[in-house]
Amino acid sequence: MAKILIVGCGAIGYELANTLVEAGHDVTGLKRNPPLANQEKFTFVRADITSVADLDALDMDFEHIFFIVSADSRNENSYHDIYETGIDNLLNRLAQTGSKAPLIFVSSTSVYGQNQGEWVDEDSVTAPTKNTSLKIVNAERKLMAHNRANVVVRFSGIYGPGREYLLRTAKQTPSIQQNPSYFTNRIHQRDCVGVLAFLLEQRIAGVSLEQCYLASDDDPTSLWEVMTWMTEKLHCNPPIAKITENNADMNKRCRNDRLKKLGYNFIYTDYKTGYLVLIQSGK
């Protein structure tokens, strides 16, 4: 049994906490506004990582730490709060207490600036044009430099229950770029949890982990193809081809070879298997 801290206990952190408890671990979830009546099998701690005082009140006798915090909004100040102030506060607290607990940090494939349909992997250049994504890149670098055992996991577009943006879009006869192909990448929320639990399991088993893993399913696909399939399954109007855009943001294809070579088996290997479950459940 390991003592684990999950910083950021939203949908993914909450599901991960329950998964790890079921595996026999002692889990604490850090959240700014935890539920008033905690009926979970893990412990909630009320704390804000942007507050030094909150973190000073937190015992740091954890063996493993997950950082799964999202910015409140897409503005630069929110990203600064999480990926600069929050990360600095956490690392300072670890240093003050002498903790050597390795972190698994949830990042995003938005760190890649490629936008011409290129294939990217963990060794690809991370030079995004958006300042918000640059803050994530800087946080990655800071964490990897702080402790060789720290691991960065870059998730592509997350979907699942409560994350049905593409399904809602498909129902609105969307205007989508058809040619040239605009590639998109996805990972189901259950696989996000699965990947994080798997990496912890490997670490505890003594496996030497790389410092970065790209987590995306097996099927980078053009948005036109995805929307066409969705509208067929939803029995609604097909997408409309819009004027070609050569400067489309985030147009890339993500490789997951490193993660699969380590031994992770995706629950949902492509968008069709994952979204079909959502469609059939009425989402």
Image (cartoon, rainbow, N blue to C red):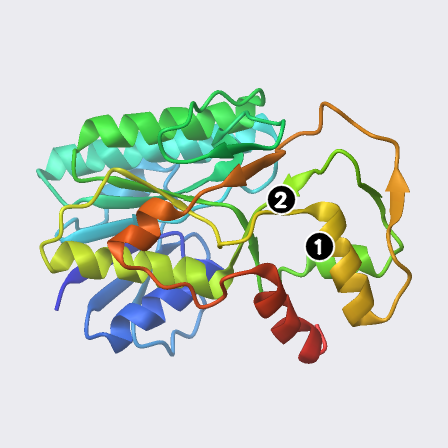
Report which quarter residue 34 is drawn in: bottom left
Identify the image quadrant of the C terminus: bottom right
Report which quarter residue 251 is drawn in: top right
Q: How many marks?
A: 2
Q: Give the side of residue 119 with respect to residue 282, left or right.
A: left
Residue name at image x 24 percent, y 44 percent: 103
Q: Nearer the viewer, residue 225 or 126?
A: 225
Element on which disc 1 rests: helix
Q: Sequence-wise, which precedes: disc 1 or disc 2?
A: 2
Report which quarter residue 31 is drawn in: bottom left
Q: Which residue is disc 2 drawn over?
A: 184
Whether 185 is drawn above or below 235: the answer is: above
Q: Position of residue 167 (x, y in %)?
A: 74, 61
Element on which disc 2 rests: strand
Whether 99 is drawn above or below 232: the answer is: above
- Contact, mark 1 vs mark 2 (Cβ under 8 Å): yes
| Residue 161 appears anywhere in the view | no
Q: Nearer the viewer, residue 261 or 75?
A: 261
Q: Amino acid at mark 1?
A: Val
Instruction: Report how far apart the C-alphas of labels 1 and 2 lie in the structure.
Output: 9 Å
Q: Nearer the viewer, residue 18 or 234?
A: 234
| Residue 125 appears anywhere in the view | yes
Q: Amino acid at mark 2?
A: Thr
Q: Position of residue 146 (x, y in %)?
A: 20, 29
Q: Which residue is disc 1 drawn over?
A: 226
Q: Give the side of residue 281 with respect to residue 190, left or right.
A: right
Residue name at image x 23 percent, y 47 percent: 57
Q: Position of residue 16 (x, y in %)?
A: 36, 64
Q: Residues within 10 Å of mark 2 (few under 14, many from 20)?
A: many
